[in-house]
Amino acid sequence: MRIVDHPILGKLAQDRTVTITVDGRALEAIRGETILATLLAHGIRKCRTTEKHHEPRWFFCGIGRCTDCVMTVDGVPNVRTCVTMVRQGMVVETQTGLGEDGGGES
Amino acid sequence: MTKSFSTTGIAAQGELRGSPGYPTEARMQKGAVAVIECLQEIPCDPCEAACPVGAITVGQPITNLPVLDESKCTGCGLCLAACPGQAIFLVDLASTDGEAIVAFPYEFLPLPTKGTPVEAVNREGAVVTSGWVVRVLNPRKYDRTAVVYVAVPREHAHEVRSIKRERFQQGAG
Amino acid sequence: MTRFQVLVVGAGPAGLAAAIEAATAGATVMVIDENSAPGGQLFKQIHKFFGSSAHYAGIRGLDIGRKMLDEAQSCGVEIWLDSTVWGLFPDNHVAVIRDECSMLIEAEKVILATGAYENALSFPGWTLPGVITAGSLQTMMNVQRVLPAKRMLMVGAGNIGLIVSYQAMQAGMDVLAVIEARDRIGGYAVHAAKIRRYGVPILTSHTISEAHGAERVESATLVHLDDRFLPIEHTERRIDVDMICLAVGLTPMAELAWMAGCQFAYVPEAGGHVPIHDENMETTVPGLYVAGDITGIEEANTAIDEGRLAGIAAAEALGYCSQDEASGRKALVCERLDELRLGEVNRTRRTVQRILQAQSSGVQQELSDVSPQRGRSQIG
């Protein structure tokens, strides 16, 4: 959920938006926010499932250190969603295990 | 300083009344006065700089507990907004109609509205009485720390230190 | 190869302060940060700072961050963002990845201001979606402006646990409890008072034994601890929460200092292994300085002052500042640092400083024992 008003931070400017797709679903994102922030804004509580036991994972450190929050972005697996900014047309997918390198440079 | 405040964050009445920032009952009866509930020696002194009439002294070293000169204090409330620990209040026992006015710093939304009834809480967040909002100040110079004044039955003046926080609905996410 | 006189790794409070001092003195300064925005932890700190009103007290962390950033930019400091320093090689050769290219940058003086990372606490269920660090929640609420959950349990009653609990309420969350394994609050009493006032219980001598839930956190089991930190049987109870925040300490992020061959001291009260430094914030590797949480976990205001010390010292070593002038300015900063470390509540910090000073003089003594003619510049 978005914090639209805050006693210290004031009102949230929501006018500059882009659209990304997450598992095929089009979501509105605010320019300059991280992919993870967009997920949280829309109540999405999973980034990936683990390789062996297929357990859900979300985020942990939020600052790009722990890699809990990785997803496949524009075909590239293991992208840290907590430190990656959204871009118009970005394609984000829940990753299974280590993901598959379906695009981008290897 | 005694164990209670530093262990739990809750000061016992004895700890408070013994501290150099706590005014006398007699002074509270004359009108609004600052009540400083800062009982732990930490390096901090913005209250001293905030007071326009020099009623608060911290001096050197800046871990000194703030000392209130109640004769100088005009009850303006600037120190309530300035204190980073939100440890300063105003108490006014001057009224003759059985009500006291307590002011406290408040940094939540929604800000209470003048004239509305509220549930007043003590230092542990327990509702002890009901009251009503006399005034809410939130000028720019307070840097987003609003100061809320509530009227409560006089016998609760030494307990009431805030109001029950209303959950703020953020709206559709 | 690009060359700078002073290269600062980390654009948080310590790094920016160091850059400002060095640039003001006349050196060419570059700051490199892996994040896409500078300021380190400062922009998450929406509360008013403590300390001396003569220096930033009473001002909100995020506003201090903005002022420092403006000052750094107006001093001509070059700032590279989205750039990761992954290596530190002899003679201050710094390896950086930027725009998917790796490069080596040479600097006469390097200042490491890389901060710290949050500790984890593992317990059954800790991998469930909804278990995060306190700093992570702070980033989401105060920087990204999103709320990940509604009902939170905070583990740890140090300053971070207490402050983030308060900020969680400001953002619209309910904090069901703050638990602390020790028998007392670790943070400032006023931070505790601010959340007690809104009904948040602080349960000392408690820990979390398990997090429960199918696909996400749904509840947590708390247990009472005895005076040896062992769980007391039959004291378990469950609370309904959808988020568990861990505020269980920080550890200096000192990998680059390890790599460069700095001598370290193990000081648990400082957060673990910390690089030894002298009164100029210089490590045992000549020309390599440290400032901020990498030297031991403290606060933003001490990070700023340590950064200033390192910046002044680096400028002095480069010849941009006379010894007298540098001496005077460093003395003022040291006075402030001492002031920030006063009080019973800060006793551990003073112990840490004494240990570090002893280690540092020990190192210098060893060197002069080995060869009285050899200066420190001959090691490493």
Image (cartoon, helix red, strand yellow):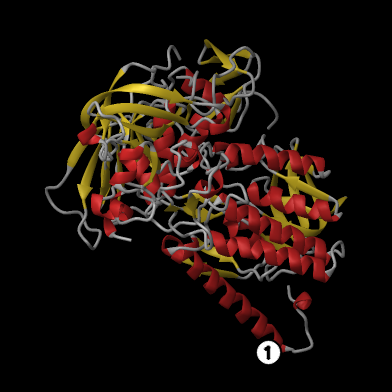
Disc 1 designates what residue? C369
- Furthest-left residue in this view: C234
Q: From the top left corner, tell me how far across and down residue C367 is, in percent.
A: 69, 83
Q: Residue at x 65, y 23 (%)?
A: A103
Quadrant housing the N terminus of chain B: bottom left
Q: Is residue C221 above or below residue C119?
A: above
In this image, C300 relative to C101: left or right? left
In this image, A62 relative to C102: left or right? left
Q: Is residue B75 above or below residue C359?
A: above
> Who is closer to the viewer here, C350 or B18?
B18
> Who is closer to the viewer here, C55 or B103?
B103
Q: From the top left corner, tell me how far across and down residue C286 is, in percent.
A: 75, 69
Q: Is residue B91 above or below residue B40?
A: above
Camera sees residue C130: yes
Q: Residue at x 46, y 62 (%)?
A: C346
Say which chain tag 1 marks. Answer: C
Q: From the top left corner, tell me how far across and down residue C23 is, in percent.
A: 82, 51
